[in-house]
């Protein structure tokens, strides 16, 4: 029992030290390899595929209802891109 | 209309919750969180509290408001509280620029974005239209 009492704090201390030794996760820049392009140019209001590979949730800009502009960066809603024009 | 959830609802866009993708997000002010230029919607208040407690880990990829780079925040990202919100940065250099003039960066001003993307003759000029 005495050995158990002595061992428990030591184990906790070792666990704490192990946690302290973990290097902090660094901030990571996401480099988009792709280009921005319409998914289907034949459509009147095509969706856009952005440089990160994601396709716009919308097929027309949410305010003026026009064709999406590949030069306008998207706003991300729950991680999904909304295109603008 | 002027709030983002109004526009999303007008287009009948639907999103899964930012915490539990099996649940639909509620698109209104009470279920929204803004982190940098990203918007997150949730299924209920409990999910929002969970999100708040584990920011920025739950935010996924964010946009640096200064450099516009997309980045995944690490364990201790550069950050600054401004006007009731915490802003996260991809680098200390971005943080320094933001500290010097935060109001310059707190709204996504599309006309000042440098177009990395190809020119499209069919697309209207962003600088003229101001976005939409």
Image (tube, coloured by chain):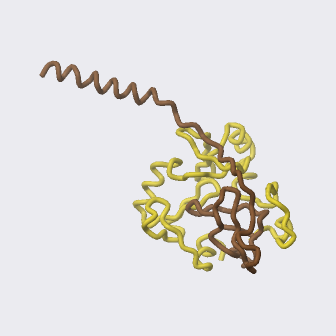
Chain colours: A brown, B yellow
For residue A64, what is the image quadrant?
Answer: bottom right
Measured as percent of width and height from the top left, residue B132 is found at: 74, 71
Of residues A31 and B124, the one drawn nearer to the viewer in this rendering: A31
Measured as percent of width and height from the top left, residue A46 is found at: 72, 74
Of residues B64 and A21, the one drawn nearer to the viewer in this rendering: A21
Measured as percent of width and height from the top left, residue B19 is found at: 46, 59
Residue at (63% x, 53% y) in the render: B36
For residue A19, what is the image quadrant?
Answer: top left
Residue at (62% x, 40% y) in the render: B78
For residue B3, what is the image quadrant?
Answer: bottom right
**Residue A75 falls left or right of residue A44:** left
**Residue A37 falls left or right of residue B11:** right
Position of the C terminus of chain A, as image quadrant, is bottom right
**Residue B123 falls left or right of residue B19:** right
Measured as percent of width and height from the top left, residue A48 is found at: 70, 67
Of residues B80 and A76, the one drawn nearer to the viewer in this rendering: A76
Name the outermost residue toward the left.
A1
């Amino acid at each position: 029992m005495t050995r158990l009492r002595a061992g428990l704090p030591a184990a906790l201390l070792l666990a704490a030290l192990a946690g302290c030794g973990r290097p902090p996760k660094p901030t990571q820049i996401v480099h988009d390899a792709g280009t921005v392009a319409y998914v289907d140019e034949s459509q009147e209001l095509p969706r856009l595929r952005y440089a990160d590979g994601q396709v716009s949730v919308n097929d027309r800009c949410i305010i003026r209802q026009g064709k999406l502009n590949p030069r306008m960066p998207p706003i991300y809603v729950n991680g999904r891109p909304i295109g603008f024009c | 209309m002027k709030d983002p959830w109004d526009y999303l609802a007008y287009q009948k866009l639907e999103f899964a919750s930012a915490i539990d993708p099996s649940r639909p997000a509620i698109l209104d002010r009470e279920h929204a969180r803004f982190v940098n230029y990203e918007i997150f919607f949730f299924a209920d208040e409990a999910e929002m509290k969970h999100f708040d407690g584990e920011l920025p880990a739950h935010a996924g990829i964010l946009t640096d408001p200064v450099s516009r780079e997309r980045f995944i925040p690490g364990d201790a990202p550069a950050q600054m509280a401004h006007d009731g919100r915490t802003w996260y940065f991809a680098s200390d250099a971005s943080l320094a620029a933001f500290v010097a003039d935060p109001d310059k960066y707190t709204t996504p001003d599309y006309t000042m974005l440098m177009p990395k993307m190809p020119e499209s003759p069919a697309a209207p000029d962003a600088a003229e239209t101001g976005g939409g």
